[in-house]
Amino acid sequence: MHKHGGKKSKQSNSKSSRDHLQRTSQSISLHGGSIGRQPEASPATGSTSQYGKNSFEAGSSSRGKEMSRLVLNPIKNHKPESYEDMNLDISSMLLSSLEMHLPSYMLGASRNNKASYMRGILQDYVPPALRYRDQKQKEYREKIMSNYQPLHQELYTIDPVAFFVPAFLKAIKDNTEQSFRSIMSEPAPGIFTFEMLQPRFCELLITEVEHFEKWADRTKLHVMRPNTMNQYGAVLDDFGLQTMLKKLMEDFISPLSKVFYAEVGGSTLDSHHGFIVEYGSHRDVDMEFHVDDSEVTLNVCLGRQFSGGELYFRGMRCDKHLNTMGHSEEIFDYSHVPGCAVLHHGRHRHGARATIAGHRVNLLLWCRSKHKNSKNN
Ligand SMILES: O=C(O)CCC(=O)C(=O)O
Ligand SMILES: [Fe+2]
């Protein structure tokens, strides 16, 4: 399975908000990206391909480092992929030449997965690559910030009444577990769903992202995607929304996470990665089975009309046991509803099924804490 995120996001997090690739892209499916469908098989069948011997973990993040490796003796006749079109922060030539050093079980993985795997290793051990990445990201943001004209300025500062539905606002204002539980369902342990965003806010945010994409297209700016698992979508922090999202986390998510996720760092959230994912024709189709690079994840559907795209959850795991078997009582599926939020622990394994018609846009806020309890790592 994937650890959605990666070293990139973590390291850059302290310096900038593009922290997202850090922990994500490091845990990889052997079967080249179809693992998102594997949890469909009933765990009761005891299928080992679910999380067992047919998958493996690879990581360069501090949490999964020991699992990543290259082999000393290269497979000389291996024909490497080209990574040039991927706009990665690491030389595509370096990746191509490193490929023959991949463990044999990695060679058949998808290009994305191989890139994530190698990138994860390089980012830990090649400081210049990190510097290059951070520099590249800084330039990218500066370019946007000095040229991009927002479409809806009102999105850039939190306006609680305009953003949130009244019941959510009241619950946050009352600030008690009881008030939170009065608006939230907990359909599976540690997963909370609730109505959160006003329809108008959702539509404004979608059109702002469309506006940004069009501007980037016109100005020939290659949009950096939220992480290696997305071909579409945008990082909201990259085009000016980081202050608003910081406040969203501090004033509206932290009160909840203090109560419901204290044991995994929910009381000390201190950074975030905010982005949009987009599914439908000419966009991403689904999201592979993964865990997030976050302590707490807020996932809110913004719209528009779609079918499919359900989230499937398959139990919480620490890093060491990401790929262990699931149990039937861990199965929880959720259908997105525009305006409604799902709040979950980042280590709650999940994926999103194919959006089979229409256009689905979701807002993701990965909330992180530097002071999370180490026993949960
Ligand atoms: O598509 C979704 O709703 C899930 C996206 C997700 O899990 C992620 O981006 O981390
Ligand atoms: Fe996720």
Image (spheres, helix red, strand yellow):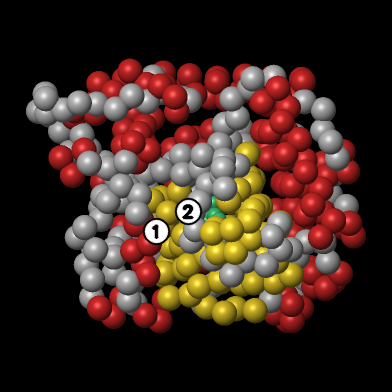
**Is 355 drawn above or below residue 24 in the view shown?**
below
- Please state the horizontal and vertical placement of residue 343, each as a whole percent of the image: 61, 65
* Residue 105 in the figure: left or right of residue 142: left
Earlier sequence position, callout 1 versus callout 2: 1
Residue at left offset 57%, top offset 79%: 187
Mark 1, residue position:
36
* Residue 148 in the figure: left or right of residue 300: right
**Is 171 drawn above or below residue 2 in the view shown?**
below
Residue type at tag 1: Gly
- Please state the horizontal and vertical placement of residue 185, each as a whole percent of the image: 65, 79
* Residue 47 in the figure: left or right of residue 39: left
Residue at left offset 27%, top offset 42%: 109
Residue 62 lies in what quarter of the image?
top left
Which one is nearer the viewer's eye here, 223 or 255? 223
Residue at left offset 48%, top offset 19%: 132
Location of the C terminus (image quadrant)? bottom left
Mark 2, residue position:
287
Residue 121 lies in what quarter of the image?
top left
Which one is nearer the viewer's eye here, 304 or 1? 304
Which one is nearer the viewer's eye here, 232 or 162? 232
- Please state the horizontal and vertical placement of residue 333, each as a whole percent of the image: 50, 73
Residue type at tag 2: Met
- Please state the horizontal and vertical placement of residue 90, each as a whole percent of the image: 41, 23
Residue at left offset 23%, top offset 75%: 46
Marks 1/2 in contact by CB < 8 Å: the verdict is: yes
